[in-house]
Image (tube, rainbow, N blue to C red):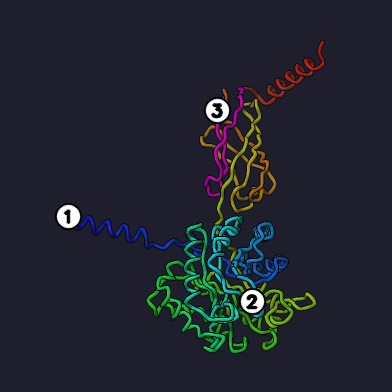
Amino acid sequence: MKKVFIFVLSLIVFFGTHSPIVAKVKPQDSPNNKFGIHITDERDLENAANLVNSSGGDWGYVTFVITESERNHDRWQKTFDQMRRLHLIPIVRLASKPNGDNWEIPQESEINNWIAFLNSLNWVTQNRYVIIANEPNHATEWGGTIDPDAYATYLNNFANKLHEASSDYFVLPAGLDASCKTTKTTMDEVTFIKRMLTREPSLFDNLDGWTSHSYPNPDFSGKSTDTGRGTIQTFSWELNYIRSFGIYNDLPVFITETGWSNQSVNSDSISGMYKYAFENVWNDKRVVAVTPFILNYPDFPFSQFSWIKADSSFYSYYEGFQKINKTKGRPQQIESGQILGAFAQPIVSSDSDFVGIIVVKNTGQSIWNTSNLVAQSDNQDVSFKNILFFDIEPLKTGLIVFKAKPEQKRGVLIKSIYLSDMNGKRVTNSFPIEAIIIRTTKMQLSGIFDRISSYFKGVVKGP
């Protein structure tokens, strides 16, 4: 019996200390619009929204980069707030600093600074999608060297600390270049992944998904029907290779870079290629988001990938992409708020409605409006008919006017009021409202108010 107890205790200790902490919300559990785009400037967000939320779509994705020197809370909170209004889900790639032709090697000492910055932001959705670095199998992306061991350790440590900070972080590895060979400046992806897993065998226990750069090669001009490595189906080849190591995690896939060269492929043909890809390849249930590279970069070195020309007009595949049928996404958002005060009409007729005001602060992630918020009572003695207010954004305070009807016939009404979402889930604290209910008609009540008003006018004038 003692041995059994020790065995069970050992199992509890083992799983208690070794179970990975990963993001709570699976993006596939809710309606998801996998259409997205990659941008370099937040001024392109409106064009991005018009692209990814078209033809029935809502809540598409946008991938962008934040570097160490750009960790400015006000700038990115403003960007997140705009994305919230436009119904865009951010995928944030974290980068070090450029140094000549290379990106500096990310430093472990900067991880805590990154987390402090990321935690300071009110994110758009509950899942905080974060990509750690970019194509480290290129020397230019890792300080002029190729070091899969160092990247694996950095990624593993960063992922652990993010999950310790919040289970809402959805940690993704850097996308790799699947088409390059092993040279002095690049490393074959097969070798790179193998070296990563040799260094950190449990790495995938700390990741929430997989990042893929599924480019249609060679020369970014491959057919949409091509299969395997170096095509728009690269993500599938990558997952199959990872499975060869005995890793069977059902990893959600984020294709954060893909796209055809407008210098090698006719613009009109690119439209049809995207339509085929989304309807026949990227419709794979494992694929959460596809954000082609890049919306607006008409200059060297990425002009061949740009969706916008130097004269600010759009390539034809922008409009073609818009016409593809999309899904109305409903990402999970944290709903919370605080009622700071509530006031009701002091005297209420038992046969009529009464009105009141609620002072409330939105402490969650969604923008409150009359289509997603209702007033409720903790009992059945008050029935709320409607509420009226202007949009209340996160971290803002607003006034809500409500109309309700008492169910009791007379007495002092001291009941609590709170706000809930349309599914009845409570999003605020309860707050008491008080009124005296008189069993009289609305006309009689009006007369009472007139007499009270006349009395006070007399008091003010005096003898």
Mark 2, residue position: 293
Mark 1, residue position: 1
Q: Earlier in the sequence, mark 3 or mark 2?
A: 2
The numbered mark at residue 387 is: none
Is 342 drawn above or below residue 370 in the view shown? above
Q: Position of residue 313 (x, y in %)?
A: 77, 76
* Crowding at mark 1 (Cα within 10 Å: few <14, some 14-19, many 20+): few
Q: Earlier in the sequence, mark 2 or mark 1?
A: 1
Going by the picture, which residue comes out furthest to the top?
Answer: 463
Q: Where does the N terminus fall, quadrant-wise?
A: bottom left
Q: Do residues under tags 3 and 2 come within 8 Å of each other at their CB atoms?
A: no
Closer to viewer: mark 2 or mark 1 = 1
Is 375 drawn above or below residue 241 in the view shown? above
Residue 432 belongs to magenta span: yes
Local secondary structure at mark 2: loop
Closer to viewer: mark 3 or mark 2 = 2
Local secondary structure at mark 1: loop
Going 67% across and 89% down the picture, which residue do you hit? Answer: 264
- Give the residues drawn in magenta, as a range: 414-439
Q: Amino acid at mark 2?
A: Phe
Mark 3, residue position: 408
Local secondary structure at mark 3: loop
Choose top left, top right, bottom left or bottom right for residue 81.
bottom right
Q: Amino acid at mark 3?
A: Gln
